[in-house]
Image: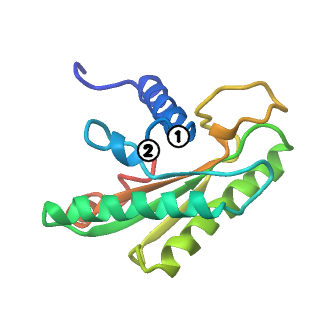
């Protein structure tokens, strides 16, 4: 379809946005005006903890989206939190750590009462990397959690649309 991005093009754009945000050249919130980029939290190697700075940035981004939806008269109806890992460890370990990262982000946001009760957590392990690497390579952009927020009115029509 004309005007629609292929999955590969979309992932390329997301990788570029994540690279900019990770390098602190521009915050993810500043990118929101022209494109959709979900709130993303990046993790250190083999860690499920976020730094205080990363936690604060994640909270700011989620709060920004909540305010954005409210400005259009909508609320957050459903959330999908996706965890990812790089390819530096064994596949089974990467699946577990990606899931634990997603749970950690859920717990941080739930403790601040930012999310509704309808939350889906998914773990992709070392699949769906933003930056492709060889097996065994550490890559910060791939050690992440993405928080996909769905408007209440959209989530009623298709409750799993944001969980891709």
Could you tell me which residue is drawn at 52 percent across and 63 percent down?
56
Contact flag, marks 2 and 1 (Cβ < 8 Å): yes
Could you tell me which residue is drawn at 24 percent across and 65 percent down?
156
Image coordinates for residue 157, horizontal then vertical, percent: 23, 60
**Is 125 situated above or below 88?**
below
- The residue that disc 2 covers is 27
Could you tell me which residue is drawn at 77 percent across and 49 percent down?
94
Count of numbered labels shown in the rendering: 2
Q: Badge 1 local density, few (<14 within 10 Å), some, or many (20+)? A: few
Image coordinates for residue 129, horizontal then vertical, percent: 62, 35
Q: Quarter of the image containing the N terminus?
A: top left
| Residue 141: quarter of image | top right
Q: Badge 2 local density, few (<14 within 10 Å), some, or many (20+)? A: some
- Element type at mark 2: loop
Name the residue at the top extreme: 2
Name the residue at the left extreme: 73
Q: Nearer the viewer, residue 65 or 130?
A: 65
Q: Nearer the viewer, residue 163 or 25?
A: 25
Could you tell whether 106 is left or right of 156 in the image?
right
């Amino acid at each position: 379809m004309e005007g629609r991005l292929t999955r590969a093009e979309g992932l390329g754009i997301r990788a570029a946005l994540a690279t900019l945000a990770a390098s602190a050249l521009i915050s993810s919130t500043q990118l929101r005006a022209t494109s959709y980029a979900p709130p993303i939290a990046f993790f250190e190697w083999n860690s499920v903890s976020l730094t205080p700075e990363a936690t604060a940035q994640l909270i700011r981004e989620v709060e920004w989206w909540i305010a954005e939806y409210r400005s259009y008269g909508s609320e957050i109806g459903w959330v999908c939190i996706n965890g990812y890992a790089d390819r530096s460890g064994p596949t089974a370990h990467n699946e577990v750590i990606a899931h634990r990262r997603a749970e950690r982000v859920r717990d941080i946001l739930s403790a601040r009462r930012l999310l509704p009760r309808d939350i889906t957590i998914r773990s992709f392990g070392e699949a769906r990397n933003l930056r492709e690497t060889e097996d065994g390579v550490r890559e910060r952009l791939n050690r992440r959690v993405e928080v996909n927020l769905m408007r209440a009115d959209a989530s009623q029509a298709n409750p799993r649309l944001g969980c891709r």
